[in-house]
């Protein structure tokens, strides 16, 4: 290998380079191609990717004390590569998981059999900030509540893939997955001709089909409900609305009329809306039902949804399963509803609501990762080995004050991948967020959004806290030639 690989080392499992320094089978063509590039060529490709991002206007918003800052999307041009045979197993596990979670949510708002059978404690649900009593007695179309799920996956140093958490409220990031692929095709088209990379651009087609399946109308009117231009994911809202042929609307653009239906204000008057893909949290979608001060939602929207006059994805109340304490019960949930063993493992988790497990977490704050139950974006989290004594003391007080709100987990050595840092390949930790859709059918993206911690040794991959991203290639190598599913075959033929 060229000199740039001479000092390449990973602290654990590397996605592209094996322990003996050789490329992993699925990454062989990519590594061979990278080895042919001079340092100047590599730098040129990275600049070409950055230029494409600027031209395409791919941005995200960071909130800070100085106000909202729009930044260009950070992309490293060395992709993450996954063998298609391994991905097939992960895909099956993600489908199993979302099926079980939707059965769980539907049960919670109806028969509550899992609570009666003491598989999940009743008090855990009733104390959840995301359990919505307003949803009791509801069964949405197909019995599905979480139509779009972004489950975060990590790989430990032994090569095991774990689900780190499930995002079931308003998961974001899929537009960046799609745009990363477009940028990579511009920056390094040659390597795409050498590798059998499965496509990702069928996601928006699947999303449109899934949303349409929630309505009985032949050609339903779809809208994407956004909090507005200052939201950190506004780029994604506009991207997805355009891609699926939906109108991008804010709460003020919609009205519930006396007939109970939801209408969109248009130039010619009003147009009935059949399906709302909402990117607004539960608490703000209907001031009549939840936060009365909200200007982001629509008065009467919950009544329209409960009467079946509009579909909402994700459904109100789905966030009850988007809770890091509930996460610890997902293996039991899979067994209870599906009578199957989970195909993807959970990270071992200690529940601070349990006195014995709470004491273990308090005694081992320096070595554990501690997370609040319902925060996102890495906020409110303690990474023990990288924390100070003051931060540990503050977390201990938080846990004692509200034990229901915290879990502890071992600090995993997340897998790495080569990442360009100052012209050299350096191992940086990463995770992966695939996106799963469930409506009439159930589909999984081919790969997902790989997020990478750009700081050496850091485990924080969130873009809002300085993380970057990579394109994710699911590759059919010589030893991995599974049959394509229908959507993959159609996309490849096109």
Image (cartoon, rainbow, N blue to C red):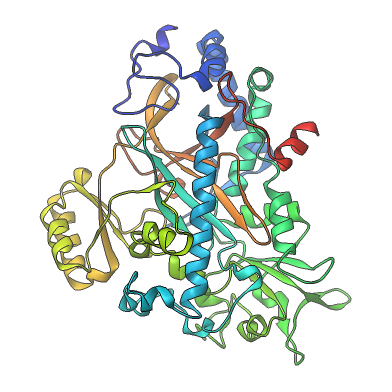
* Residue 24 against residue 103 in the figure, above or below: above
Q: Residue 138: name its quadrant.
A: bottom right
- In the rendered image, residue 142, in percent from the top left (x then y), is placed at 65, 68
* Residue 175 against residue 47 in the figure, above or below: below
- At 73% across and 41% down in the image, what residue appears? 486
Q: Residue 487: name its quadrant.
A: top right
* Residue 477 against residue 166 in the figure, above or below: above
- In the rendered image, residue 15, in percent from the top left (x then y), is placed at 43, 28
In the image, 260: left or right of 27?
Answer: right
Q: Quadrant of the N terminus?
A: top left
- At 65% across and 43% down in the image, what residue appears? 57
**Does residue 329 appear anywhere in the picture?**
yes
Viewer-nearest residue: 86 or 425? 86
- In the rendered image, residue 296, in percent from the top left (x then y), is placed at 59, 75
* Residue 486 against residue 242 in the figure, above or below: above
**Does residue 69 appear anywhere in the picture?**
no
Q: Quadrant of the C terminus?
A: top right
* Residue farthest along the left direction in this orientation: 363
- In the rendered image, residue 467, in percent from the top left (x then y), is placed at 43, 41
In the image, 248: left or right of 319?
Answer: right
In the image, 375: left or right of 401?
Answer: right
Viewer-nearest residue: 257 or 464? 257
Q: Residue 117: name its quadrant.
A: bottom left
* Residue farthest along the bottom direction in this orientation: 258
- At 56% across and 25% down in the image, what residue appears? 46
């Amino acid at each position: 290998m060229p000199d740039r690989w001479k000092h390449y080392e990973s602290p654990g499992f590397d996605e592209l380079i094996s322990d003996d320094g050789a490329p992993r089978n699925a990454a062989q063509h990519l590594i061979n191609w990278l080895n042919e590039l001079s340092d100047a060529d590599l730098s040129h490709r990275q600049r070409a990717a950055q230029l494409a991002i600027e031209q395409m206007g791919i941005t995200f918003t960071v909130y800070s004390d100085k106000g909202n800052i729009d930044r260009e999307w950070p992309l490293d041009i060395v992709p993450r590569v996954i063998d298609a045979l391994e991905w097939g197993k992960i895909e099956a596990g993600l489908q199993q998981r979302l099926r079980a979670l939707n059965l769980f949510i539907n049960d919670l708002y109806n028969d509550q059999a899992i609570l009666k059978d003491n598989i999940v404690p009743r008090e855990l649900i009733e104390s959840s900030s995301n359990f919505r009593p307003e949803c009791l007695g509801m069964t949405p179309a197909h019995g599905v509540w979480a139509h779009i799920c972004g489950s975060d996956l990590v790989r430990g140093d032994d090569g095991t893939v774990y689900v780190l958490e499930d995002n079931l409220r308003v998961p974001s990031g899929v537009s960046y997955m799609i745009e990363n692929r477009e940028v990579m095709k511009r920056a390094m088209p040659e390597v795409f001709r050498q590798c059998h990379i499965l496509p990702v651009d069928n996601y928006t087609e699947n999303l449109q089909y899934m949303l349409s399946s929630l309505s009985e109308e032949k050609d339903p009117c779809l809208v994407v409900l956004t909090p507005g231009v200052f939201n950190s994911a506004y780029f994604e809202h506009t991207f997805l609305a355009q891609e699926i042929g939906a109108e991008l609307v804010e709460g003020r653009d919609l009205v519930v009329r006396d007939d109970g239906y939801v209408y969109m204000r248009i130039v010619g008057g009003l147009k009935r809306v059949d399906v709302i893909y909402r990117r607004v949290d539960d608490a703000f979608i209907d001031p009549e039902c939840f936060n009365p001060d909200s200007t982001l939602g629509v008065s009467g929207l919950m009544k329209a949804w409960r009467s079946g006059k509009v579909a909402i994805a994700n459904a109100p109340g789905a966030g009850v399963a988007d809770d890091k304490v509930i996460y610890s019960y997902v293996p039991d949930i899979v067994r209870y509803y599906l009578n199957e063993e989970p195909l993807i493992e959970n990270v071992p988790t200690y529940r601070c609501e349990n006195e014995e497990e709470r004491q273990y977490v308090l005694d081992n704050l320096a070595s554990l990762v501690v997370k609040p139950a319902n925060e996102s974006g890495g906020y409110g989290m303690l990474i023990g080995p990288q924390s100070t004594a003051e931060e540990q003391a503050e977390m201990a007080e938080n846990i004692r004050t509200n034990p229901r709100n915290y879990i502890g987990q071992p600090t995993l050595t997340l897998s790495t991948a080569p990442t360009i840092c100052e012209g050299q390949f350096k191992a940086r930790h990463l995770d992966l967020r695939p996106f799963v859709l469930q409506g009439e059918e159930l589909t999984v993206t081919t790969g997902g959004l790989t997020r990478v911690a750009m700081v050496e040794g850091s485990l924080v991959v969130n873009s809002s806290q300085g993380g970057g991203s990579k394109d994710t290639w699911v590759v059919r190598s010589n030893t991995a030639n599974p049959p394509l599913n229908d959507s993959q075959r159609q996309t490849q033929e096109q």
